[in-house]
Image (spheres, helix red, strand yellow):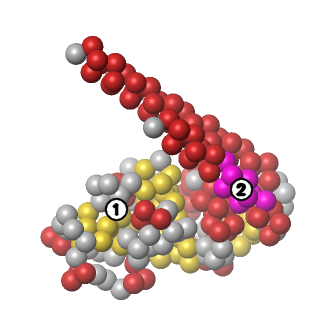
């Protein structure tokens, strides 16, 4: 029993260290973002502003029937699969090719997903290779940027809580917070120059890569 307890304590310690590493990396990336671009809600660097639809494609999920879900097939990303800024498809529902919708509901690496309803409206998750080719469920929006540097910028910008609150206030109100793809497309955001975007993407990618290396070392 003591040995089992020691193993569990070690596993818990590793989880805590891994989470601490992720938290510190996210803070570093956020700090880098603010240093290069400034606060997106006040735009202190006076970047020109455009609607999100002018720099990225916003698409909606498909209304899959729950009776189609099973243990085999292609994953379907639902709101609950968006966790801590990324996607966890370990428990994702799946559908067979027989029920596959139009390919415009399929996600790809680099997409950013956002929950459109429920208690976690506005939370985002970046699509990595593990979820490439999965289907997008209803009430989740996909944002597809034209380049990696735009994707990196939008991922951090859309995670800004003040920007989210502003978006929710401008959306059609109801008792529960809800957003629509239309609301997202109309979101006004600062448009930095390409040089700044490339610099941020390079620094953020380096920080994320170092975080992954440290996490692997803890396993």
Furthest residue in direction left, as rendered:
67
Residue located beneath label 1 in the image: 78
For the residue pair 137 and 86, the one nearer the viewer reads as 86
* Residue at x 51%, y 42% (from the top left corner): 216
User: Is residue 79 among the parts visible in the rendering?
Assistant: yes
- Report helix, strand or loop for mark 2: loop
Residue 185 position, x and y percent, is 57, 74
Q: How many numbered circles does the render carry?
A: 2
* Quarter of the image that includes the C terminus: top left
Q: Is residue 188 left or right of residue 99?
A: right
Residue located beneath label 2 in the image: 40
Closest to the camera, between mark 1 and mark 2, is: 1
Residue 168 position, x and y percent, is 52, 58
* Range of residues picked out in magenta: 199-207
For the residue pair 94 and 63, the one nearer the viewer reads as 94
User: Is residue 42 among the parts visible in the rendering?
Assistant: no
**Residue 144 on the magenta segment:** no
Q: CA distance from mark 1 to mark 2?
A: 28 Å
Q: Main secondary structure of the magenta part?
A: helix
- Report helix, strand or loop for mark 1: loop
């Amino acid at each position: 029993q003591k040995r089992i307890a020691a193993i569990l304590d070690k596993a818990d310690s590793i989880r805590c260290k891994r989470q601490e590493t992720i938290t510190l990396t996210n803070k570093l990336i956020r700090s880098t973002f603010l240093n290069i671009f400034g606060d997106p809600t006040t735009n202190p660097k006076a970047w020109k502003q455009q609607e999100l639809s002018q720099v990225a494609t916003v698409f909606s999920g498909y209304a899959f029937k729950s009776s189609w879900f099973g243990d085999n097939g292609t994953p379907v990303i639902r709101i609950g699969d968006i966790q801590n800024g990324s996607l966890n498809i370990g428990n994702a529902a799946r559908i067979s090719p027989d029920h596959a919708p139009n390919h415009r509901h399929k996600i790809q690496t680099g997409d950013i997903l956002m929950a459109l309803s429920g208690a976690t409206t506005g939370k985002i998750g970046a699509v990595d290779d593990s979820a490439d080719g999965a289907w997008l469920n209803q009430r989740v929006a996909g944002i597809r940027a034209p380049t990696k540097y735009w994707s990196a910028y939008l991922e951090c910008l859309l995670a800004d809580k003040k920007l989210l609150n502003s978006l929710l206030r401008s959306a059609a109100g109801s008792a529960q917070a809800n957003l629509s793809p239309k609301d997202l497309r109309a979101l006004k955001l600062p448009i930095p120059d390409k040089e700044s975007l490339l610099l941020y993407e390079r620094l953020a990618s380096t920080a994320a890569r170092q975080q992954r290396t440290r996490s692997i070392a803890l396993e």
